[in-house]
């Protein structure tokens, strides 16, 4: 076994240093980005605030709830599923029925940007499989397998210009 050349050692050291720097930047980002997050506003706290009359409006976008209180603060809460009837539960917490009697304004935000996720999740496997197929066909075309040549020759019609 031969010893690695000096240029090979420098390449290896460079790769290790770059990986170390990237890992350090990722850890630094995670540590610094978590400090300024607001505390979690639980769904049970939302219902308790609604019962106390502190909630004026709720806007729902998927499983995310944007809650606006009477003192002007806005907070974000989350529900486990879009099928949960948030409006009915909030109105029940206030002691009123759904409709004009309920003092909490409720709106459902339109879903935007979902098509990007569907496009990516649908096209990435197609591109990977297509790329693999293309790579394999290039490899087969480069080989000079007599069996492949015979199969290709037998499937082609005879050439009239060869006579």
Image (cartoon, helix red, strand yellow):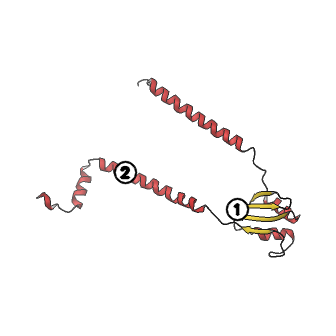
Q: How many other residues sit within 10 Å of disc 2, few (<14), some (14-19) or many (≥20)?
A: few
For image coordinates 32% across by 50% down, the residue present is 140
Q: Which mark is residue 116?
A: none
- Give left or right: position of 15 versus 58: left
Question: Residue 128 appears at what percent x and percent y?
Answer: 46, 53
- Give left or right: position of 153 versus 137: left
Q: How far apart, in angstroms, are the residues tagged by discs 1 and 2?
A: 43 Å
Quadrant for residue 155, please give it.
bottom left
Q: Are marks 1 and 2 in contact (CB under 8 Å)?
A: no
For image coordinates 69% across by 66% down, the residue present is 109
The quarter in which the N terminus is drawn is top left
Quadrant for residue 102, please give it.
bottom right
Q: Is residue 18 visible?
A: yes
Pointer 2 residue: 136
Pointer 1 residue: 63
The quarter in which the C terminus is drawn is bottom left
Q: Is residue 84 visible?
A: no
Foreground tag (1 vs 2): 1
Q: Viewer-proximal residue, 109 or 30? A: 109
Mark 2 lies on a secondary structure that is: helix
Question: Residue 112 appears at what percent x and percent y?
Answer: 63, 63
For image coordinates 70% across by 62% down, the residue present is 63
């Amino acid at each position: 076994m031969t010893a690695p050349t000096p240029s090979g050692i420098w390449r290896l050291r460079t790769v290790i240093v770059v990986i170390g720097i990237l890992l350090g930047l990722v850890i630094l980002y995670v540590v610094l980005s978590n400090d300024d997050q607001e505390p979690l506003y639980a769904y049970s706290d939302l219902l308790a605030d609604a019962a106390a009359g502190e909630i004026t409006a709720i806007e729902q976008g998927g499983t995310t709830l944007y809650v606006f209180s009477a003192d002007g603060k806005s907070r974000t809460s989350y529900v486990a599923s879009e099928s949960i009837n948030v409006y009915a539960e909030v109105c029940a917490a206030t002691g009123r029925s759904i409709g004009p009697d309920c003092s909490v304004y409720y709106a459902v935000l339109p879903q935007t940007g979902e098509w990007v996720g569907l496009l990516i999740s649908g096209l990435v496997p197609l591109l990977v499989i297509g790329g693999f197929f293309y790579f394999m066909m290039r490899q087969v075309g480069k080989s000079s397998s007599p069996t492949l040549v015979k199969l290709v020759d037998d499937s082609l019609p005879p050439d009239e210009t060869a006579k």
